[in-house]
Each structure stands twice: as structure tokens, then as C-alpha cells.
């Protein structure tokens, strides 16, 4: 598996740094109805302090993988890919680390340089340093497309919610070429008492082995 493929595999989960979006259009003011949905989503995400569930990931080529996820806001997440993959993605609140057990590689990226930081933040604020470019309605829910207004995190993320009950059901990360990696969440359940060790991932390689270059 090439480094590019590994990055693509983890893209939807770790939301790795993406190329700048081509010809970004300026955001237009939200309507009152759209702002109400954004506020509702922000309140829900703020309440999602700890959760566990399953994910199915579909990359730009249509390949699918799946696994188990753990979330513990602020900043922490763990994504365990099912066998035969030996990929593990962990955000410890400061960095997003990717370990490939088969290739014995390890890479790390600042969390704040990823779109995932938008909903792992301590305080969910879609009105501060976040640009909402689109709010879309569906028959059974809605989606919000956002990017970092300070451009620390390149790329954009679309968060998708069910409406009744209100729940995060997935997200899509889109790159400058229009390629998207989609995550669909299932069985996402609020929980408590997730072990801190779930969100620690150390470089398993010998100290004399340098980190992979991104």
C-alpha cells in the first residue's frame, strides 16, 4: 500500500490535511431557517461528549472499509479498522496519528490542521472562525458544509445529521480535485467512562527509525 493510499484510507476519519479548495466562493449570510439548523447541530455536537459506534468508509474510488470508533470531546477520537486492515487512527487532542501495523509505518499531523477539529473542539462554535458554505435539507435530515475560516485546516467537511431523532450520521471530506471520502456512522451511542488509554498512540517503531514524510 502506498503512502497516498494510506492517506486516502484515513482521510475520512482523520481528515488529514487537504490541498486548498480551488476557487473558494465567499460565504453568503445564512437564512434564519438555515441558522436554526446550524444552531441545533452545534448544540447536539456540544452534548456529544463521549460516544461509541461503527463506521463504514467509502473512498473516492468506491472502495469501502469499516471499523469501530470512539469519540471523547474535546479533541479525542479513535478509529479501529476491522481485519484484515491493521490501520489505527487516533487523535489525542493535539495530534492525529496513523499507525499501519502491516507496513509498520507511523505518521502524525496536528489536529488543528484537520477539518475533523471542527467538531472535536472544546466549544462547538459555527459562528467563530468557521465558514458555513452550505446548509442542505434532505427528506430525513440535513447537512452542513464547513471549513476553517482561518485556513489552518485546508479542505472542507460536510456533516450529515438525521432529523428525528437528531444524530450525527456521517461526514464527507472533499479535496481540491472534487474527490470525496465519505464516512457513514451506525450504532453511534452516547456513553461514559471511555478509558484514556484508547486515545494514546505512540510510535511503535525503534527510535532510530525516522518518521515518514508526509
Image (cartoon, grey):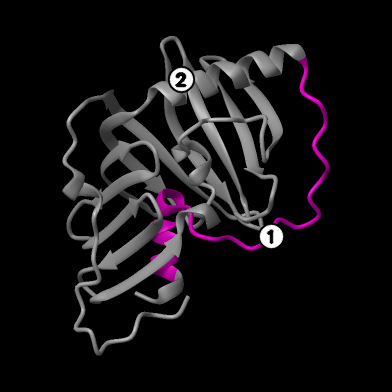
Q: Position of residue 205 (x, y in %)?
A: 21, 79
What mark, if any, has residue 20 been given in the picture? 1
Viewer-nearest residue: 188 or 47: 47
Q: Specify the segment rendered in magenta.
A: 5-31
Q: Nearer the viewer, residue 148 or 155?
A: 148
Residues under labels 1 and 2: Cα distance? 29 Å
Contact check, label 1 and label 2, Cβ < 8 Å? no
Q: Residue at x 67, y 40 (%)?
A: 129
For the residue carrying disc 1, how many other residues have a C-alpha within 10 Å: few (<14), some (14-19), or many (20+)?
some
Quick check: 160 left or right of 209? Answer: right
Q: Is residue 18 magenta?
A: yes
Q: Decide: is 207 above or below 55.
A: below
Indicate the quadrant where residue 6 lies.
Answer: bottom left
Q: Residues within 10 Å of mark 2 (few under 14, many from 20)?
A: some
Q: Which residue is mark 2?
A: 44
For residue 146, say whether it is visible.
Answer: yes
Name which quarter of the figure residue 7 lies in: bottom left
Whether residue 124 appears in magenta in the rendering, the answer is no
> Comparing marks 1 and 2, which lies closer to the viewer?
2
Amino acid at each position: 500500500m502506498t503512502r497516498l493510499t494510506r492517506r486516502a484510507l484515513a482521510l475520512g476519519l482523520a481528515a488529514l490535511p487537504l490541498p486548498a479548495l480551488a476557487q473558494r466562493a465567499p460565504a453568503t449570510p445564512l437564512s434564519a431557517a438555515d441558522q436554526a439548523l446550524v444552531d441545533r447541530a452545534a448544540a447536539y455536537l456540544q452534548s456529544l461528549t463521549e460516544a461509541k459506534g461503527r463506521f463504514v468508509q467509502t473512498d473516492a474510488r468506491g472502495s469501502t472499509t469499516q471499523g469501530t470508533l470512539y469519540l471523547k470531546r474535546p479533541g479525542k477520537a479513535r478509529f479501529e479498522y476491522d481485519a484484515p486492515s491493521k490501520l489505527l487512527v487516533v487523535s489525542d487532542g493535539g495530534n492525529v496519528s496513523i499507525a499501519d501495523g502491516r507496513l509498520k509505518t507511523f505518521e502524525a499531523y496536528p489536529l488543528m490542521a484537520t477539518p475533523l477539529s471542527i467538531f472535536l473542539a472544546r466549544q462547538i462554535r459555527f459562528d467563530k472562525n468557521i465558514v458555513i458554505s452550505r446548509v442542505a435539507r434532505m427528506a430525513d435530515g440535513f447537512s452542513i458544509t464547513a471549513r476553517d475560516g482561518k485556513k489552518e485546516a485546508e479542505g472542507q467537511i460536510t456533516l450529515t445529521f438525521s432529523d428525528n431523532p437528531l444524530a450525527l450520521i456521517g461526514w464527507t471530506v472533499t479535496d481540491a480535485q472534487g474527490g470525496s471520502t465519505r464516512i457513514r456512522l451506525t450504532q453511534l451511542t452516547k456513553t461514559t467512562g471511555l478509558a484514556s488509554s484508547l486515545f494514546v498512540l505512540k510510535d511503535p517503531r525503534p527510535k532510530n527509525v525516522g518518521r515518514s514524510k508526509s
